[in-house]
Image (tube, rainbow, N blue to C red):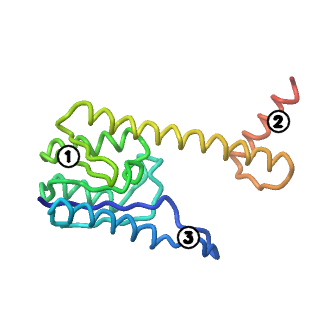
Amino acid sequence: MRAAVYCRLSKAPKVGDSSTNPRSSLDRQEQDGRRIAAEQGWDVVAVFREIVPASDPFKARKEWTQLLELIEAKEVDAVILWMEDRANRHVVTAAELVKVCKEAGVSRIVLPSYEYDLTDPEDEAKFYGEAVRAQQEIARMKKRIRRMQLELAENGHLALRAAERIRFRLLVRSRSKR
């Protein structure tokens, strides 16, 4: 069987942050993917690596697009991911992957911890469930970050963009009327 390995890191560390090396995270994901393929006796025909957020399903992701094109061309029989959220953090992109896989006859999405069989409706639903959980996690994180930014702005510690300033002023006015 022919397998493709997809590796993704959400964002690169900030300049000067030596605590994490984005390459080492991607390297670990690739190593785990290659190990899975070797254990199954599969040939790795392609490895896709990128540093890009997956929380926005409409943001261009070059390596992701190339993976989907490889699947559509029926050049792989299985897709290996480190975790579901490395592929997507939105049910839209999860559905896109499942659709492309099913149309191309690819029924296996394999992780170190689980092997999804897309011919099994329960496994397909489980894959979507993981995407929904990841999407919820992103939504909660955005709320926490936004709240922190508003608090910093209220205390004069954060410069806001024009649209954010307008929203912030409206929020402050609505709070002061209470």
Rate crowding at label 3 as few (under 14), some (14 to 19) or many (20 or more) other CA atoms within 10 Å. Answer: few
The residue under the point 38% across, 35% down is 129
State how far apart marks 2 and 1 are (Cα).
Answer: 49 Å
- First in residue order: circle 3 vs circle 2: 3
Which quadrant is the N terminus positioned in?
bottom left
Question: What secondary structure is marked by label 2?
Answer: helix
- First in residue order: circle 2 vs circle 1: 1
Q: Amino acid at mark 3?
A: Thr
The residue under the point 83% across, 32% down is 173
The residue under the point 71% across, 49% down is 162
Residue closest to the far top = 178
Query: To which residue does mark 3 refer?
Result: 20
Between 171 and 152, which is closer to the camera in this rendering? 152
Residue 126's disc number: none
Query: To which residue does mark 1 refer?
Result: 101
Query: To which residue does mark 2 refer?
Result: 172
Q: Are marks 2 and 1 in contact (CB under 8 Å)?
A: no
Question: What secondary structure is marked by label 3?
Answer: loop
Horizontal side, residue 111 vs residue 133: left or right: left
Image coordinates for residue 84, horizontal then vertical, percent: 37, 48
State how far apart marks 1 and 3 are (Cα).
Answer: 33 Å
Which quadrant is the C terminus positioned in?
top right
